[in-house]
């Protein structure tokens, strides 16, 4: 299949504060950056060369992934001085492609876990002669997404903005963030300025009368854009619900150097990062404990992300929250749905103690 472009330059604002230090595609799910999970799946489908379209914190990718040899692919970096949007990033990355104008190029959003058969998508694209093939997935509530209706022959009929009224919900099919372009089509995207593929490039291809295919696939699919979907994606990988070649499904995952007390209760796909500690009878479920973090005895962490070296002190309760790197949540605090603590912040213990001589 050859070459792929990964779009990894977004700021990941919805995942702050985790993305203040680490770009979203490099955040670990089940112990590996999202980008690495994607590259490994692409490699297994026959991709040999990956161009990463980077912008926000571009240096982090090259530092950690290098030339790609450890992952069994060749990685090239297309860096945008100013973010060029999804279409501009694809056009910018095309300068580093080596394939011919008629060859297929797979393009992946860098924050999606998906079970789609990449090889079949690319083969179908090549056989159809289409300018573009999109992976479409069905969602229960399409109101938050742009919609992509197709006909019985997988031909895309329109790209619709987010529906505002019930009548505008013409389909439950949405763009899943995985495309196959014929390379010459990428070369026609205007260079040197921001372009959105969703708003500009895709509708323009239809206006020009070119064949745009949409392949609906109901394999596992999750956009890791929000903290809640991020922890769910990680837990789904650990439990074998999301695809991860060679991984044995398990109730939890301990990375090298993780220490967990025998009295602790771990489950629901929790990952305990490198050198992280879970003490005493702490309960940790459905969560990501990043490297070097600490959960003390009697603390309870559910469906949450605990940043690197952060500490959850005895008896604290964290449910559906994001704790930034190096933060300290003092004993007895309760943080619930949607709470976010910024890196380095210390919340003092809440239990009021009276000294005996007061
Ligand atoms: P939010 O700020 O939380 O919406 O996240 P985001 O910045 O990642 O935006 P979004 O999820 O819409 O982006 C979809 C994909 O495109 C992600 O993989 C981004 O990394 C990528 N992306 C978005 N904008 C750019 C850009 O300007 N340049 C590059 N190279 N990639 C981009």
Image (tube, rainbow, N blue to C red):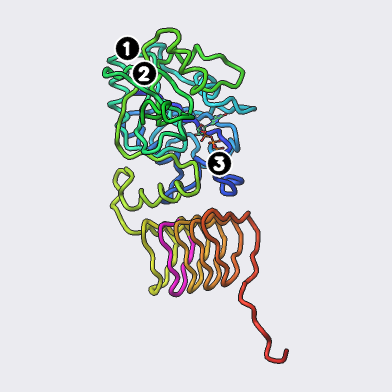
- The N terminus lies in quadrant: top left
Write the residue at 42% across / 37% down: 112
Distance, label 2 to label 1, CA atoms, is 14 Å
Along the viewing direction, whichever of 189 and 72 lies nearer the viewer: 189
Which residue occupies 61% across, 19% down? Answer: 193
Residue in view at x 37 percent, y 56 percent? 269
Identify the element where label 3 is drawn. loop
- Location of mark 1 (residue): 129
Which label sits on residue 252? none
Placement of 251 over or under 298, stated as above or below? above
Q: For the stretch drawn in magenta, what is the main secondary structure?
A: loop
Left or right for 61, reference 207: right
Q: Residue furthest toward the right?
A: 358
Residue 141 on the magenta segment? no
- Which numbered disc flags the more N-terminal residue, 1 or 3? 3
Above or below for 287 versus 97: below
Is the CB of mark 1 within 8 Å of ligand 1?
no
Q: Position of residue 332 (x, y in %)?
A: 56, 72
Q: Position of residue 60 (x, y in %)?
A: 56, 40
Q: What distance separates the C-alpha of mark 3 from that of mark 2?
A: 32 Å
Residue 342 relative to residue 264: left or right = right
Q: Quadrant of residue 178?
A: top left
In magenta, the rendered stretch is 275-287
On residue 23, the disc is: 3
Above-or-below relation of 133 to 6: above
Q: How many neighbours does mark 1 have within 10 angstroms: few (below 14), some (14-19), or many (20 or more)?
A: some
Q: Which residue is mark 2?
A: 156
Q: Bin the neighbour count of mark 3 within 10 Å (Cα to Cα): few under 14, some 14-19, many 20 and up.
A: many
Residue farthest along the bottom direction in this orientation: 357
Question: Looking at mark 3, is its residue's CB closer than 8 Å to ligand 1?
Answer: yes
State the image coordinates of residue 260 (x, y, percent, origin top left): 42, 68
């Amino acid at each position: 299949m050859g070459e792929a472009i990964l779009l990894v330059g977004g700021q990941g604002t919805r995942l702050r504060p985790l993305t203040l230090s680490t770009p979203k595609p490099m955040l670990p799910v089940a112990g590996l950056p999202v980008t690495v999970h994607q590259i490994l799946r692409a490699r297994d489908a026959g991709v040999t060369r990956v161009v990463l379209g980077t912008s926000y914190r571009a240096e982090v990718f090259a530092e950690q992934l290098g030339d790609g040899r450890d992952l069994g692919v060749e990685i090239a970096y297309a860096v945008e001085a100013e973010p060029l949007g999804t279409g501009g990033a694809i056009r910018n990355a095309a300068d580093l492609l080596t394939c011919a104008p008629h060859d297929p190029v797979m393009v992946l959003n860098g924050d999606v876990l998906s079970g789609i058969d990449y090889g079949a998508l690319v083969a179908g694209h090549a056989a159809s002669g289409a300018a573009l093939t999109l992976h479409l997935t069905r969602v229960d509530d399409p109101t938050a997404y742009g919609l992509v209706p197709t006909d019985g022959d997988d031909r895309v009929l329109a790209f619709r903005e987010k529906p505002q009224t019930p009548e505008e919900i013409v389909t439950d099919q949405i763009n899943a963030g995985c495309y196959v372009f014929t390379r010459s089509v990428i070369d026609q995207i205007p260079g040197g300025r921001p372009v959105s593929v969703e708003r500009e490039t895709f509708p323009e291809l239809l206006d020009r009368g070119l064949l745009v295919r949409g392949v609906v696939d109901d394999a596992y699919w999750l956009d890791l854009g929000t903290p809640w979907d991020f922890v769910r994606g990680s837990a789904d990988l650990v439990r074998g619900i999301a695809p991860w070649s060679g991984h044995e499904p398990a109730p939890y995952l301990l990375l090298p150097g993780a220490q967990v007390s025998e009295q602790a209760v771990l489950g629901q796909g929790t990952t305990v990062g490198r050198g992280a500690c879970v003490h005493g009878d702490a309960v940790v479920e459905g969560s990501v404990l990043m490297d070097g973090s600490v959960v003390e005895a009697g603390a309870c962490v559910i469906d949450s992300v605990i940043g690197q070296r952060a500490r959850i002190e005895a008896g604290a309760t964290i449910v559906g929250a994001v704790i930034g790197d190096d933060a300290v949540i003092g004993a007895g605090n309760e943080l619930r749905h949607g709470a976010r603590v910024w890196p380095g912040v210390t919340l003092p213990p809440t239990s009021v103690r009276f000294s005996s001589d007061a």
